[in-house]
Image (spheres, helix red, strand yellow):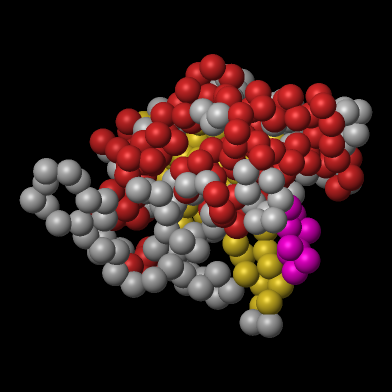
């Protein structure tokens, strides 16, 4: 399935598949995903818990658990195919230095018995070629970049607020100066005011450093604050892709409509709508459109045939039979 920003892409992902071996069978967590991302832009990966967002991020980083099947598909960074590289070669050439990740749950990402500054410096020191004084100086530079004072260097994670811990995780992702940073739910468990601070930080870093970002969230409204494009993910697949304005103003997949309707709006008397049912079983997904059992618009074909991607407008694509008269990609 094709979902591409029609420019010179920094990241190109084609028909990516990731499955996990379980006692029940293969869990198809990422099932044929294709998209691209231009340098300096931000892509939001949006969907409910269990939709495959975090698995897609781990696939991009090639950080897979032992029960994962070998990745299928293609991934290029700056035109170079990287999915077929040996693990050690990918780790040395790309992981951390070109593509980096801030993991979900800032507290779980930090060692509780290790000072913050030493944790951030670990990635620099592990690669060798840099002495501790230079590494620690780089860490202090990163702390300043994310809006933290130098005294944070010597503190332990439990001494920091939730927002400060999240800034530390972002500093860890940036310390090797990557071109692309993946952030998995970077504002989860933060109150609204701290969320706003983190979002403002991400916008500033994107602007000042020319960073490419992949922003993972269940909150499509939050993604709109920093992202240029959005990929809506359901059942391990991208069901809608487009620029942020098109997705917000002209949602073209019923699942996207439901996500938007589930978001509370300030000063609105309209109550948020809950999406009935549950995400599909990815060991035995339903035939046809995976959203059909929960879709109020579903017709007979939705329960039998998997919809291809249809063009809604330039750069805006939806996998829904409601768009069936549009030109397929």
Q: Nearer the viewer, residue 148 or 240?
A: 148
Which residue is painted at 32% across and 31% down in the image? 245
Which residue is painted at 78% across and 58% down in the image? 70
Q: Which residues are magenta?
A: 63-73
Count the numbered circles shown. Answer: 0
Q: Nearer the viewer, residue 103 or 242?
A: 103
Taken as a whole, is the magenta stretch helix, strand or loop? loop
The quadrant in which residue 249 appears is top left
Please say if 56 is above or below 248. below
Which residue is painted at 66% across and 40% down in the image? 154
The answer to whether residue 208 is seen in the rendering is yes
**Percent of width and height locating residue 150:** 61, 29
Report the side of 22 relative to 243 (left or right): right
Please say if 47 is above or below 19. above
Farthest-out residue, left: 269
Is 71 a magenta residue? Answer: yes
Is 327 a magenta residue? Answer: no
Farthest-out residue, bottom: 23
Q: Nearer the viewer, residue 303 or 55?
A: 55
Report the side of 206 relative to 327 (left or right): right
């Amino acid at each position: 399935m094709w979902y591409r920003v029609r420019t010179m892409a920094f990241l190109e992902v084609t028909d990516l598949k990731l499955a996990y071996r379980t006692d029940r069978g293969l869990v198809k967590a990422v099932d044929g995903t294709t998209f691209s991302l231009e340098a300096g832009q931000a892509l939001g990966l949006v969907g409910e818990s269990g939709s495959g967002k975090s698995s897609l991020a781990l696939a991009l980083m090639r950080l897979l658990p032992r029960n994962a099947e070998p990745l299928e598909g293609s991934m290029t960074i700056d035109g170079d195919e990287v999915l077929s590289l040996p693990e050690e070669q990918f780790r040395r050439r790309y992981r951390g230095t070109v593509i980096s990740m801030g993991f979900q749950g800032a507290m779980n990402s930090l060692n509780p018995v290790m000072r913050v500054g030493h944790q951030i410096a670990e990635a620099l020191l592990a690669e060798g070629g840099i002495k501790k004084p230079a590494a620690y100086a780089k860490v202090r530079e990163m702390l300043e970049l994310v809006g933290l004072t130098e005294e944070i260097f010597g503190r332990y994670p439990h001494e920091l607020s939730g927002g400060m811990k999240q800034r530390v995780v972002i500093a860890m992702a940036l310390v090797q100066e990557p071109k692309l940073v993946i952030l998995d739910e970077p504002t989860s468990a933060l109150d609204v005011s701290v969320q706003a601070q983190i979002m403002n930080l991400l916008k500033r870093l994107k602007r000042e450093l020319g960073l490419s970002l992949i922003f993972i969230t269940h909150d499509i409204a939050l993604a709109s604050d920093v992202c240029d494009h959005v990929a809506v993910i359901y059942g391990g697949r991208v069901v809608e892709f487009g620029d942020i304005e098109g997705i917000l103003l002209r949602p073209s997949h019923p699942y996207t409509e439901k996500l938007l309707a589930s978001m509370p709006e300030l000063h609105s008397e309209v109550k948020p709508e809950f999406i009935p049912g549950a995400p599909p079983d990815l060991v035995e997904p339903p035939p046809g459109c995976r959203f059909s059992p929960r879709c109020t618009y579903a017709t007979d074909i939705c329960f039998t045939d998997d919809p291809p991607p249809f063009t809604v407008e330039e750069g805006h694509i939806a996998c829904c039979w409601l768009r069936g008269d549009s030109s397929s990609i």
